[in-house]
Amino acid sequence: MRISNRILIIILILAILIPTLFLTIGVQTPSGKFTGDLNLTVETCEETDYGRDPYNFGEVTATTVDAAIKETRVFVDYCRADNLLVEYYCKDDKLKTSGIECSFYGSEWKCREGVCVK
């Protein structure tokens, strides 16, 4: 009985974590890029690299409202892996994120300090 309870708990944890991972990273498109929403209500959204720009480091300053708590947060582009750039950007008054595979631009491209570089 104890083993089956442990398995049930593991299944429940995975059922919660896996969808959360896909909401954070997004879904891969045929172009080799990932897109997704962060599901944050945003009052203001300003960015330094003006959109999805894998060649320039950027940051987004967003005023979010979550459970009636208003706060300004900064989201910076970063490398999730040697080849995967996580890019934050504003679109349609929403805070969005994309995971961009740098090797999509060529096999010599890598992710370094929040940008795709050759």
Image: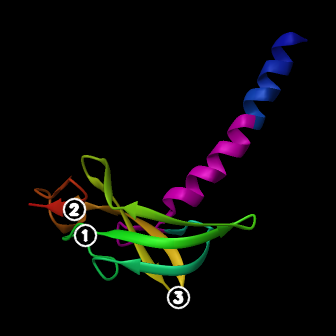
Residue at the right extreme of this rendering: 1
Q: Between disc 2 and disc 3, whose residue precedes?
A: 3
Task: Name the residue carrying label 2.
Answer: 115
Q: Residue at x 56, y 65 (%)?
A: 38
Q: CA distance from mark 3 to mark 1?
A: 20 Å
Mark 2 lies on a secondary structure that is: strand
Q: Which residues are magenta?
A: 13-35
Task: Name the residue carrying label 1.
Answer: 54
Mark 1 lies on a secondary structure that is: loop
Discs 2, 1 touching: Cβ within 8 Å: yes
Task: Name the residue carrying label 3.
Answer: 92
Q: Nearer the viewer, residue 105 or 110?
A: 110
Q: CA distance from mark 2 to mark 1?
A: 5 Å
Q: Quadrant of residue 87?
A: bottom left
Image location of residue 30, percent across then percent down: 40, 71
Image location of residue 44, percent across then percent down: 52, 81
**Numbered label tally:** 3
